[in-house]
């Protein structure tokens, strides 16, 4: 509600699509604005009571004029909503900007407008965000993997083989390290800084995984690509996926280029 109210009153927003809303909402009060904003207001909410990192994720698209056509008196809300759904269902490659805010030991705001990735930290003394990292580049490879291995028995055999091989010390004598918070923003932020791979695969219970394309996978993939990394559904680029519905779910593998490409070879 806080996000929606701020976006409604900004005068720059035409359509809001939230993980918490069944359909996109046309912002009638601000038809002078026309950006389409998609967001997950509170990622990792199951961790709140344990004071573990949570966050907010967003993406911004340019408008589709169909959604702002003059609304006739006899138009039904359904017809307006249909146009808005068409407007919002754009591939991530159309994103103008994306970012997330992580609420942890400090409040960190990470943003890209398509010209690199920048991180800001909240200075509580002044109540303002201060630039703390610019042009963030994810390491090309990393020895950290972040998967919920509680679902291991429900994964397909190719993915099991991949995970098993990560645990094999091999000639180096050192296996990959497992790190899983259960908060996409927290796990992604660590991966962005240290390298490695984060994955939320499909399994026997969730045929397409649990993460939503519009609100989570596409914005995070836009960010990671701007930092020199890669976002994949296991076989193709996440940003190239054309959404067919607002709450569409897709598998997500995201992180260092070498690590994501290694996983894709296992799944091929």
Image: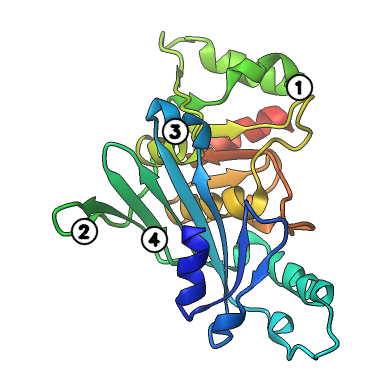
Work out whether residue 88 or residue 142 is closer to the camera in this orientation and state it: 88
> Counting residues from the N terminus, which is met first, the one under dot 4 or under dot 3?
3
> Counting residues from the N terminus, which is met first, the one under dot 4 or under dot 1?
4
Q: Residue at 74%, 82% (x, y): give it.
A: 66
Q: What is the distance, in whole Å, between disc 2 and disc 3 at their CAs?
A: 23 Å
Which residue in the protein does label 2 denote? Answer: 127
> Counting residues from the N terminus, which is met first, the one under dot 1 or under dot 2?
2
Secondary structure at badge 2 equals loop
- Examine the rendered structure and indicate whether residue 206 appears above or below residue 244: above
Q: Residue at 49%, 52% (x, y): give it.
A: 57
Q: Are marks 4 and 2 in contact (CB under 8 Å)?
A: no
Which residue in the protein does label 3 denote? Answer: 48
> Counting residues from the N terminus, which is met first, the one under dot 2 or under dot 3?
3
Give the residue at the far left of this rendering.
125
Measured as percent of width and height from the top left, residue 62 is found at 58, 76
Label 2 packing within 10 angstroms: few (<14), some (14-19), many (20+):
few
Q: What is the distance, in whole Å, between disc 4 and disc 3 at their CAs?
A: 31 Å
Q: What mark, if any, has residue 156 been given in the picture? A: 1
Measured as percent of width and height from the top left, residue 189 is found at 40, 41
Residue 237 visible, this angle:
no
């Amino acid at each position: 509600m806080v996000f929606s109210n701020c976006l409604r009153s900004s005068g720059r927003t035409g359509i809001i699509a939230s993980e918490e809303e069944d359909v996109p909402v046309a912002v009638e009060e601000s038809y002078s604005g026309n950006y389409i904003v998609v967001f997950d207001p509170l990622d990792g909410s199951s961790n709140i009571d344990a004071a573990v990192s949570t966050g907010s994720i967003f993406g911004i698209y340019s408008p589709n004029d169909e959604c702002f056509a003059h609304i006739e008196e006899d138009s039904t809300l359904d017809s307006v909503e249909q146009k808005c759904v068409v407007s919002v269902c754009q591939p991530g490659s159309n994103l103008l900007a994306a970012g997330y805010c992580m609420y942890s030991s400090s409040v960190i705001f990470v943003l890209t407008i398509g010209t690199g990735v920048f991180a800001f930290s909240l200075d509580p003394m002044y109540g303002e965000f201060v630039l703390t990292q610019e042009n963030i580049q994810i390491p090309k490879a990393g020895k950290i993997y972040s998967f919920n291995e509680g679902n291991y028995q429900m994964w397909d055999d190719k993915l099991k083989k991949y995970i098993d091989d990560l645990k094999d010390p091999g000639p180096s004598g050192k296996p990959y390290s497992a790190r899983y918070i259960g908060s996409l923003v927290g796990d992604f932020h660590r991966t962005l800084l240290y390298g490695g791979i984060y994955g939320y695969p499909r399994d026997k219970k969730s045929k397409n995984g649990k993460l939503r394309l519009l609100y989570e996978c596409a914005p995070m993939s836009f960010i990671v690509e701007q930092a020199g990394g890669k976002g994949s559904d296991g076989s193709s680029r996440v940003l190239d996926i054309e959404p067919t519905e607002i709450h569409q779910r897709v598998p997500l593998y995201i992180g260092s280029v070498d690590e994501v490409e290694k996983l894709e070879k296992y799944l091929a």
